[in-house]
Structure formats: C-alpha cells, structure tokens
Image (spheres, helix red, strand yellow):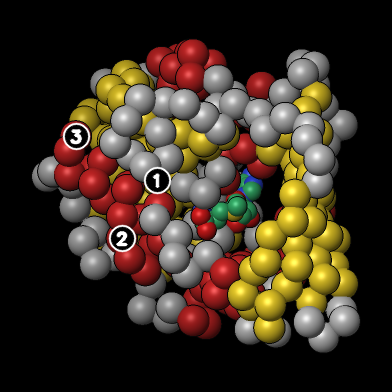
Amino acid sequence: MSSVDIVGPEHLEASNLFYRDPELYDGVQSDSDSARICRALIDRHHPEARTLLDFGCGTGRDLERLAQHFDCIGVDLQPCLVDYARRTRPELDFRVGDIRTVRLGHTADALACLGNSLAYVHDNQDVQGAFQTFAAHAHPETLLVLCSPVAPIGPSCPQQTHVETPLGTATVTISYEWDLRTQINTMRRHWDFASGEEAHDVIRRRVLGPRELELYATQAGFDVVEITDESGVSSVTGPGAYTVARYRG
Ligand SMILES: C[S@@+](CC[C@H](N)C(=O)[O-])C[C@H]1O[C@@H](n2cnc3c(N)ncnc32)[C@H](O)[C@@H]1O
C-alpha cells in the first residue's frame, strides 16, 4: 500500500503545536509514565541491559529518566526538537536521524520507541524500514520496547478537555477520524488559550494491530515476548500498547 503522506520534519513541525513549541510539549507531558513503564519492561525481560537507543525521542523527556539507568542515545527526525533536547538536556547525546534509515554504526542492549513515534511512519515499506533500523542496532538478546497505537480511536463527538500550560489553562477540543483503508487515525485538536490565542493540530497516526506488529518484528529478526496495555501490567485492550520483542539475531 502506498500513501500520499509527507512525513518530512517540516511537515511534522507544521502539523503539531507541541513540535512548534517543545517547551509546552515538555510541560504538558511532564507526568508521562512511558519511561517508568519502559524501564519496568526492560527489568522484567532483560535486566542486564546497560545501553539504550531511543528512536523518535522528541524532546528527550523520557531519555532523561532512562539515562538514570542506561547509557543512552536519542534519535529524532526533527532538528527543532533535537536542538531543544540538546539545549535543555546538555548532558545527553541526541542525534538527528530518520527511524526508517538511520544507522548509528553500533548496537545497544535495549531499543525504545515510545510515545507513538512509529505511528508517524505510515507506509508498509517504511514500517519495514523502521524495523530494519531496529535490527541494525540490535545484537542477540537486545530488547525492543515499542509503544504504539494498536487500535483506532473511532469517530465520536468532539471531546473537550482542559490542559494546564505555561500560558495558562487551555481548552482543547479533540475529534478523531478513522480511515480503514490506510489504517490512519487522524486526530484534530483545537486549542483555545486563556490569552485568547488559538491553535490547530492535525495528527495522523498509523495503527498497526498486535498481529501486524508481530509480523514486522518477526521479519526483522525479533521474537515478541509480550504485548501489554498502556499500564504495562495487563493484557492488551487498546488503543495503545507496549510491544516487547527480543532480537534473535
Ligand atoms: C508523539 S512524539 C513522541 C516523542 C517522544 N518519544 C515522547 O514520548 O515524548 C513522536 C516523535 O516521533 C518523531 N518522528 C516521527 N517520524 C520520525 C521518523 N521517521 N524518524 C525519527 N523520528 C520520527 C517526531 O519527530 C516526534 O518527536
């Protein structure tokens, strides 16, 4: 299947308020549990792991927490996020790179791809490329921890939520569309800030079901050892899940 999606860094930056304002992104997501769950899954399945690569690391928020336990490198497609990550977390190692093609020239004990980063890769061939990237940075026993959407959030009435931001409370109106043909879940957000400013987002995420993830992982040389829900403790219910896979070489 091919898609007309453009997933270049400029396009991503334009599509998402968080990428245009990484400080806001960090602030709003500061209570994210991803790093803790990722660490717990690595402890459960590969407690000897010492080195970690985070693909699609964004602002480096999770990497900062993971770096308390692992020697880490973060990779992201968007130079603006990597600049921000380097500025705010100067002790960490961040690189600009595309998950579909990047080759750092070495492997790590654990590979992370958190916060739905893989979902920004829309085409099957590119998803295959991403898994080949994981394999290129793996040695036997390397553990992959992937957090991604496994089921769509269906169309519903727009939902409203309130988000605390450094600019005050914002009212965010969110709606979803689901395209079964492309398996793209589109989220539209309208932001109303207390200041009277407004912003719009259109975020398009590819959904891959558990069996599809298993297939891509297996083809790239990984065996799935667990797929768990977003709490990291019970069986998968969607819409997001953690897939944990071990490289067999
Ligand atoms: C929703 S953010 C998640 C960021 C971070 N993992 C987190 O949880 O905060 C998705 C990230 O994936 C990155 N991304 C999208 N496509 C990518 C690609 N082809 N290669 C590398 N990173 C990519 C984006 O730049 C963005 O930082």
Cα gap from disc 1 to disc 3, whole angstroms = 14 Å
**Residue 140 at x, y = what percent?**
23, 28
Mark 1 secondary-structure assignment: strand
**Residue 137 at x, y = what percent?**
38, 40
Q: Earlier in the sequence, mark 1 or mark 2?
A: 2
Name which residue type carries label 1: Ala
**Residue 145 at x, y = what percent?**
37, 39
Q: Which quadrant of the figure has residue 7?
A: top right
Q: Residues within 10 Å of mark 3 (few under 14, many from 20)?
A: some
Front residue of this view, candidates 30 and 121: 30
Q: Residue at left 87%, top 79%? A: 197
Q: Would residue 235 be found to the left or right of residue 181 on screen?
A: left
Front residue of this view, candidates 217 and 230: 230
Residue holding disc 2: 66
Mark 3 secondary-structure assignment: helix
Say which mark, if any, is on residue 45.
3
Residue holding disc 1: 112
Residue 97 in sight in this render? no
Q: Residue at left 80%, top 66%? A: 191
Q: Earlier in the sequence, mark 1 or mark 3?
A: 3
**Residue 28 at x, y = what percent?**
57, 69
